[in-house]
């Protein structure tokens, strides 16, 4: 069994109304990452992701880049605690 790491990410900048959540979903599905993404009331985007081994660098680089219309100011990520609601499979946009 390969090791996975669950990370909690907050993305700041112009990341709402620019297709950022759907961009994250597409990247996550391509990399085999489970989890979810949603907008926060303060204008940030929140991500909870279960990263398979070897996907962390690619995923974080993609989050930093974002889709064409986004302007990412900061990507803050940390390990999620043991009691997280990250799914084992599938990735979806939450509303």
Image (cartoon, rainbow, N blue to C red):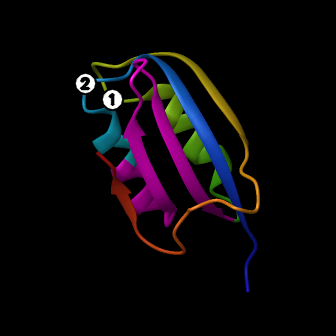
Magenta stretch: residue 45 in it?
yes
Provide the residue designation for mark 1.
Answer: 67
Give the residues drawn in magenta, as a range: 25-52
For residue 81, side relative to residue 85 (left or right): right
Asked whether 26 or 90 is in front, the reply is 90
Between disc 1 and disc 2, whose residue precedes? 2
| Vertical position of residue 24 compared to residue 41: above or below | below
Q: Given this view, does label 1 or label 2 mark the residue nearer the observer?
A: 2
For residue 82, side relative to residue 48 (left or right): right
Instruction: Give the secondary structure at mark 1.
Output: loop
| Vertical position of residue 17 compared to residue 48: above or below | above
Marks 1 and 2 close (CB-CB < 8 Å): yes
Label 1 crowding class (10 Å Cα cut-off): few <14, some 14-19, many 20+? some
- Spot occupied by residue 74 in the image (x, y as percentages of width and height): 59, 18
Residue, x 55% and y 50% (percent of image)?
48
**How far is the residue under mark 1 from the one under mark 2?**
7 Å
| Vertical position of residue 66 compared to residue 86: above or below | above
Residue 77 lies in quadrant? top right
- Spot occupied by residue 71 in the image (x, y as percentages of width and height): 40, 14
The numbered dot on residue 18 is 2
Residue, x 64% and y 59% (percent of image)?
84
Magenta stretch: residue 66 in it?
no
- Spot occupied by residue 42 in the image (x, y as percentages of width and height): 43, 18
Q: Quadrant of the N terminus?
A: bottom right
């Amino acid at each position: 069994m390969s090791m996975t790491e669950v990370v909690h990410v907050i993305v700041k900048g112009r990341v709402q109304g620019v297709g950022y959540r759907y961009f994250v979903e597409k990247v996550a599905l391509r990399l085999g990452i489970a989890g979810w993404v949603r907008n926060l009331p303060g204008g940030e985007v929140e991500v909870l992701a279960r990263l398979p081994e070897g996907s962390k660098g690619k995923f974080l680089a993609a989050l930093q880049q974002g889709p064409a219309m986004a302007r990412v100011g900061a990507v803050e990520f940390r390990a999620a605690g043991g009691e997280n609601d990250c799914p084992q499979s599938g990735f979806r946009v939450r509303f």
